[in-house]
Image: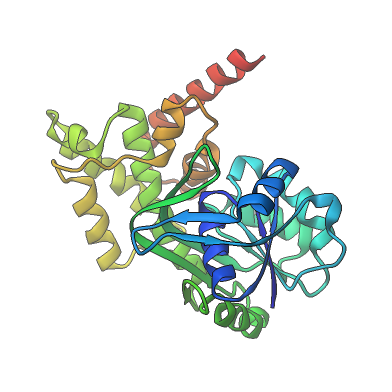
Amino acid sequence: MKLLFLGAGATGGYFGGRLANAGVDVTFLVRAKRRDQLARDGLRIEDIRGNLSVPVKAITRDEINAPYDAIVLSSKAYDLDGAIDTIRPAVSETTLVLPILNGMKHLDALDVAFGADRVLGGLCHISATLTDDGTVRRFGPLEILTLGPRIEEQKEAAKTLHATLAQGIDARYSENILSAIWEKWFFIAALASSTCLMRSTVGNIVRAKGGTNFMTDLLNECVAIADANGYPPQPKALDFARTLLTDPNSAMSASMLRDIQRGGQIEADQIVGDIIRRGQARDVAKPLLDVAYLHLQAYQNGLTSAQS
């Protein structure tokens, strides 16, 4: 299969680079500056399981001259409209679009743009960053990309894409991909809401008076929303989330908090706002999530004002 990765940042660069190194036909769709950098230096990955420098194919939007078999979309959710316009010339009637964005709001937009029969479900678990010199640096133990069909007609195509991805990365196929997406979403919504609202790590929050109850109550709101929408977390996932979010020694915080600390844009609406809307539609009480989202919107308003 011919694969197109939109962007060569932390997530797409890592998975796409590993696949290219394994001999999979991968092209990166990037801006001109990044294309020139990749042509000059190749794609560099610093990794706990071994560093990598691999020559890769990279093009800009104007250089797309044929459709691809599958496009892996790992952009930030707030850049989705631009991402859709960018990949459109590479999409044919048979092209698969695999988004590995957080939450589920992006699926509606992609369905409208390309048709629900073309858009798979996907998610990833990875901790990585892009350094100033264009190197992808991974930290932490996880490097998993999960995909699956959202409708019955996608099954065979999804299995073919999974087999291709599995040649170079830890790719997992899920028959219940929407459940898998919700299982990640309820956790990161709780993590982002708590650590961004308190501007601190999980451990610092838990060690504060009332901190454990706060974390537990916030997590319970996210779980209740997932449950009300028909995707209750599995016991193992729920136990894992409760353990992580009540650990007094944890230095963990959401990547959204790191975005705030550097004054960047955030995925507040896609991760927190959308889960609130889905809870509201099911009459789920969510007072802590509402406060956290208010806080995130205030940050975004201040960012907009500073930029105008």
Q: Quadrant of residue 6?
A: bottom right
On the picture, is 304 further left or further right than 118? left
Which one is in front, 142 or 172? 142
> In the image, residue 122 lies at what x, y percent?
54, 64
Which one is in front, 286 or 86? 86
Count the labels in the image. Answer: 0
- Which color mode does the image show? rainbow
**Which residue shows up at 48% across the image and 22% down it?**
299
Single out the residue that lies furthest toward the front.
Answer: 40
Single out the residue that lies furthest toward the bottom.
Answer: 156
Q: Quadrant of residue 228?
A: bottom left
- Can residue 55 be seen in this snapshot? yes
Q: Quadrant of residue 182?
A: bottom left
**Which residue shows up at 54% across the image and 24% down it?**
300
On the picture, is 124 further left or further right than 308? left
> In the image, residue 184 lies at what x, y percent?
41, 57
Q: Is residue 235 above or below residue 189?
A: below
> In the image, residue 240 lies at what x, y percent?
24, 59
**Which residue shows up at 62% across the image and 68% down it?**
120
Quarter of the image where the N terminus is located: bottom right
- Can residue 230 be seen in this snapshot? no
